Amino acid sequence: MHGYPNRKIRRPPITLSKMERAGFAMIKKIVLILLIGILVHAGYRYILSYQISEGFNDDLDTLMLAVSGQTEASFQQQVIQRAGRHGIHLDPDEVSVRIEDTTASSFGSRLLSRTGAAVQNKQITLDLEYQLHVYGIPLTRLVHRTKVFAAEIGSPASAQEEQLKQTE
């Protein structure tokens, strides 16, 4: 070896030119703008899915008001049709509808029974689960609705006749 053996060789530090630093700064700004754009669009899509869900829930509430005289199968088909209007795909096995006799009563049926009318109350229970997708991420919504309604209302005279028949 020639030269000075204890002497360390110093290499000049690697530095970026002003042009290269400006290029990296520009790339960082573009990536940041793209990320912000994606987040804003994802938020917008989430809000749209919430509006779809709320519109469907409002339709279900309206449907539950007009349930009297329907069968479980016909009500289930109406629920599936309403979901389709909102862009929600439901299979018949995903929708559970039960209509049962009940001793519970609504405010209206209690008022009618005070007049002597015979009121037969029924309860409808609706359970379903559906998914809305935002960027491929499934957002699961669970729906449970229960409503008591008067299925049959007899006149006060017919109620008295039934009581007479039962006592005889």
Image (tube, grey):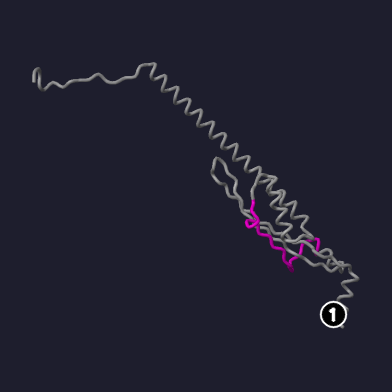
Residue 101 lies in the magenta stretch: yes
Where's residue 69, x and y in %? Answer: 79, 61
The boundaries of the magenta stretch are 90-109
Q: Quadrant of the C terminus?
A: bottom right
Residue 27 vertical placement versus 52 (above, below): above
Q: Quadrant of the N terminus?
A: top left
- The picture quadrant where one finds residue 12 is top left
- The picture quadrant where one finds residue 92 is bottom right
Q: Residue shown at 82%/67% (left/top)?
A: 119
Q: Residue shown at 41%/23% (left/top)?
A: 24
| Residue located farthest toward the right when viewing the structure as drawn | 157
Residue 8 lies in the magenta stretch: no
Left/right placement of residue 143 relative to residue 62 reads: left
Q: Which residue in the structure is indicated by mark 1?
A: 166
Left/right placement of residue 104 relative to residue 159 reads: left
**Label 1 sits on what residue type?**
Gln
Label 1 packing within 10 angstroms: few (<14), some (14-19), many (20+): few
Residue 32 vertical placement versus 158 (above, below): above
Residue 150 or 1: which is nearer the viewer?
A: 1
Residue 37 vertical placement versus 130 (above, below): above
Left/right placement of residue 168 relative to residue 62 reads: right
Left/right placement of residue 98 relative to residue 2 reads: right
What element does badge 1 sit on? helix
Q: Residue shown at 75%/51% (left/top)?
A: 62
Q: Residue shown at 89%/74% (left/top)?
A: 160
Where's residue 134, x and y in %? Answer: 57, 41
